[in-house]
Image: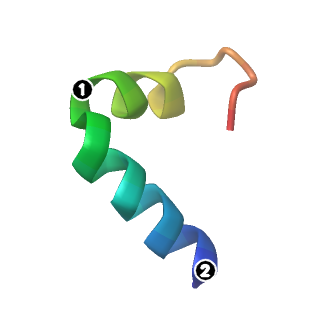
Amino acid sequence: DWMKGKTCGLCGKADGEIKQEYYTPNGRV
């Protein structure tokens, strides 16, 4: 569940930008 916390923290910093990168098939995870 360590990834969950990392993603959560990132989302808090740049919800829009990070979320987009995570949901786009860019290979950036």
Q: Position of residue 20 (x, y in %)?
A: 39, 23
User: Of the residues shown, which amino acid type is indicated by label 2?
Assistant: Trp
The circle drawn on residue 25 is: none
In percent of the image, x 36 and y 33: which residue is there? Answer: 19
Q: Quadrant of residue 14?
A: top left
Q: Residue furthest front?
A: 13
Q: Earlier in the sequence, mark 2 or mark 1?
A: 2
Q: How is the image coloured?
A: rainbow
User: Of the residues shown, which amino acid type is indicated by label 1?
Assistant: Gly
The circle drawn on residue 16 is: 1
How far is mark 2 from mark 1, CA to CA?
21 Å
Total numbered labels: 2
In percent of the image, x 46 and y 57: which residue is there? Answer: 7
Q: Quadrant of residue 9?
A: bottom left
Q: Is residue 13 above or below residue 23?
A: below
The circle drawn on residue 2 is: 2
